[in-house]
Image: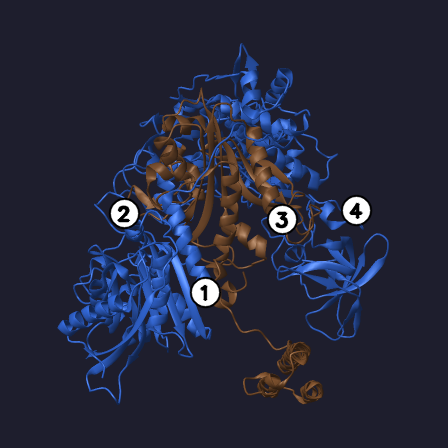
Chain colours: A brown, B blue
Amino acid sequence: MKDALLKIKELAADELLKVNDTKALEELRVKFLGKKGELTSILKQMGKLSAEERPVIGQLANQVRAEIEESITNRVKEIKAMTLEKKLKDEELDVTLPGTKATIGKLHPLNIVLNEIEEIFMGMGFDVVDGPEVEYDYYNFEALNLPADHPARDTQDTFYITDNILLRTQTSSVQVHVMEEKKPPLRIISPGRVYRSDAVDATHSPLFHQIEGLVVDKGITMSDLVGTLELLMKRLYGDDCKIRLRPHHFPFTEPSAEVDVMCFNCGGKGCSMCKDEGYIELLGAGMVHPKVLANCGIDPEVYSGFAFGLGLERIVMRRYGINDMRLLFENDLRFLNQF
Amino acid sequence: MDLSMKWLSDFVDVSDKSIKDFCYDMTMSGSKVEGYTPEGKDITNVVVGQVLSVVPHDNSDHLVVCQVDVGTERLQIVTGAQNVNSGNYVPVALNNSTVLHDGKPVKIKNGKLRGVESNGMLCSLEELGLTVHDFPYAIEDGIFILGDDCDKTLGKEIKEAIGFNDTTVEFEITSNRPDCLSVLGLAREAAATYGIKRTLKEPSYKGIDGNIEDELSVEIKNPKLCSRYIAGIVKNVKIEPSPRWMRERLRASGVRPINNFVDITNYVMLEYGQPMHAFDLRYVNGNSIIIRNAKQGEKIVTLDGEERTLSEEMLVIADKDKPVAVAGIMGGEYSGIMSDTTTVVFEAACFDGASVRRTAKKLGMRSDASARFEKGLSPKNCYPAIMRAFELVEELGAGEVYNTIIDRDCSQVSENPVEFDSEWINSFLGTDIPESDMIEYLKRLDFEVRDGKCYAPYVRIDIACKADIAEEVARIYGYNNIPSTLLKGVAEARRTPEQRFIKSVQSSMVSMGLNEIETYSFISPKYFDRISLDGDSRLRDAVTITNPLGEDTSVMRTTIIPSMCETLARNYNYRNMKASLFELGNEYIKTQDGKLPNEPVRLCIGMYDSNGETDFYSLKGIIEELLNVISITEYDVELAGTSCAFDEYRAFHPGRVAVLKKNDVEFGIFGELHPSVLENYDIGTRTYIAKLNVPEMMALADAEKTYKPLPKYPAATRDLSLVCDDKMPVASLEKAIKSAVGKTLEKVTLFDVYKGEQIERGKKSVSYSITMRSHEGTLTDEQADAAMKRILKSLKELGAELRA
């Protein structure tokens, strides 16, 4: 019997080597170790053995079973590894083929940049405020120190709805609403659409976007205006960005300034992009005119403030190198998909 | 304002600055320079020459051969001009020179004309970029023969020889600074900018004895609109061209020289910023000047030859019978200076700015004079201006000036000093400028500071409050010397719920693959027809622009849909195969007359796919997901009909348009565009549009999202296939299922709709997967089956049967 057991062990080892798939392996396992298997049939003959032989053979039989089982398990592992390896090999792809198109939409470039500017200002504690686009003359002009027949009205060709209702020509109208409704301290920006009767061309549009800014509090200085704008431009264009203020005139600010930003193309040396100026005009700003504060019920002897107005299109066009404003409102997907 | 640098040098010496620096420095101190142009910048290598001989060309009837002395050499030059004689001094373009031809620079080189060598060219005025206005004695189509007012040194650079070497600096003067629309004003700014001396001379004249009151009367009928009127008389006038220096300066200032008197009025206007006027006394009937309002319908032919019809609010200068000038804007044609004029009346007056502006606007007639008056001038400027005119008349020998004037002065100019407080200025600007420096800056600008008050020069009509003084100080100190400080104190910013809501809509759209667009808020009223809006739809009652650029942009949109259609059509036309777009934009809805419209925000979605991969349900899927994200639940989707709240439903395919509804509020419409609308827009593929009302959606959204615990017990799932009438909306089946199961229902998913062979005609098969789950324990099969029985019972009542 002992020989028979050893033979089974050898036989199993031999056959295992020939087996290459898990199914054959299972058959093999049944053949040797199953209820009707060879090992079992030998063990059935144990009864015929002497009492001395029985434990010896029993131990041997268990040993043989354990060994066969272990080699089957090992063989299983080997076969699995082989199968996997083959599968992976078969599944090799041409990684240079193009990817399947995934779609995510794009924000309009105006709003991409607007979001950025809003974030910058919100970080400085500016609330974002909306105001009406169809507006009373009072809010767009009169309260801003531009009474009827004021010559500065000429610089903003206005669309009128009635004698005293118009399409706002500037987001500055929101300043008045905010100051009427809330008391200082005020820190707001107000982005939105404005309208001027300019015929459409590469640099003009009868509709464009401005971002108004207004700060009113005790002790607000012109140097605060400089600092705020400097911070904005550094955030927008990087820490090396420099700004320059030039005296200008807006009826609703005094002193008033036009603000230029150093040309990104030439770094201030002068090039064709900045018409050899080294700087590019970007926005208008100033200290809120005491008359405007008074018009809104804020005492100019107690409070002071600054305001500024940014043209969004100009910033966006500069940012992406867009040379024709019409593209922004045509909404051609070949354009929109680039941002 | 075009400034002649030669003229400026009468008053300030900036010769040590480069023109570029000058422009920059002036800009930075507040007088913005747009650019500068050196005269004759395209003319090079042209010199003065003398014609020594003129002989006919052997091979040509119309050419002549000249020998010309240009100082350093003698040149043979062939010319076609007929006006050249030996002895003439002429401009000679040498070899490799540039002159103008049809306004463009061309190179001149030695060459042969009909076989005869020609080493250069004799130039006409036009070839130098000049006209006969600059040299009245020259002829238009011929060589410019230099007159005695030119330097005839042979070989001399021509621009220098004829005084064509000024530089014009173009200033953009803001409306608050009419004082800078003058050479003297800019001289003041230049002197202040550099802190340099200014040479000023009070104008004076000798005059002849004569009492002006004997020959002229002046009456101001409306002192509100004319605060001052000064008249002077010049006798025995000699009308002729003004001298070269005056013509030169006018030219450099962009004003065409005419004759000595017209030129003097323009010269004074440019120098002093005070518009002047000159009449021929012959045409002032009754020798009386009356400044009055026009009569309604009164007519005048102005200097530009146009007949103007006046109205009552307009101010005119009239004689006893008729208007002779529109006050402050333009003179009449008949009373102007002519070649036979013998007595001239000079006017220097001050008119109300707003009135001049209104009149000029109404008559559509702007002039250099009106541009100055309408910004507001000081009545004090009239006197020195008319004195300067008299001085020039005598200097030019143009006539004899009476030593008396008429000065009707109704102005009430009071000194209006502004508080001067250096501490306040520093605290306002955030600077630390010593008071003495401030006073120095102000002094340079002709301000006077005494007793804590600041007195502005009378030409500075813009100075009214202490912030104005701060600006004067700041701009001379230098805006860019103001330090940069950060806002003090903390402020917390947050978006409003509306802004947050819109942001979440926007980001949902983008994450579902839609591209955002921005379209004009104004549209054409014709667009209402294009989307088949009913003739009597209230959406046609739009806010209308009274002065639009064109019909296409003449009304504010009452519906956002045409903007989207137009954008889709454009993309389709550009052969973009598919488009999925959205816009968050306003509509403008009229309220009451005289009140502002409402401007509600709309979400508009538009899609097409030329490959047919987009359909009604792709759009609906996007909307469903959006509503899920913004927490609108339990809403209904119904086929839209005539009772629909959205008038735009006419734009849609009548069988493929739905309204979104919750709590009886219709908050959106979506569907496929009607084939006729597609045709209107030339879109050749099925197109899908949605419009959702943002404020309504916001009101309907569940305010807060709360966490629901994850399930602890397994779900029971049952599939169900039904057969029902084809016309039955599946929404009603779902509703029945929901109410039949009750609160253990977790999800009803429709996974198949089938019409076809195995199904009776007019019927459809609808298959659902129903998931039920309890939070109290595992659902038993019995419980699930009971629920299914309830479902079948209520579906049967609806007419839906279990599919066999």
Query: If you read the primary sequence from the N terminus, does the residue marked by circle 2 or circle 1 appear first?
Result: 1
For label 3, the residue is: B135
Tag 4 residue? B153
- Please, which chain is the residue tagged with disc 2 on? B
Label 3 – label 2 distance at C-alpha = 61 Å
Residue A178: x %, y % from top left: 38, 35
Q: Nearer the viewer, residue B655 or A6?
A: A6
Q: Is residue B92 visible?
A: yes
Q: Earlier in the sequence, mark 3 or mark 4?
A: 3
Q: Are marks 1 and 4 on the same chain?
A: yes
Q: Residue furthest front?
A: A51
For the residues marked 3 and 4, what is the alpha-carbon distance in whole angstroms? 18 Å
Q: Which residue is mark 1?
A: B513
Crowd tier of the residue under label 2, counting other residues whose Cα lies within 10 Å: few below 14, some 14–19, many 20 or above: many
Disc 2 vs disc 4: which is toward the camera?
A: 2
Residue bearing mark 2:
B597
Foreground: disc 1 or disc 3: 1
Residue type, mark 1 in image? Gly
Q: Nearer the viewer, residue B554 or B346?
A: B554
Q: Which residue lies at the image location 69% right of the left edge and 73% below the top edge?
A: B61
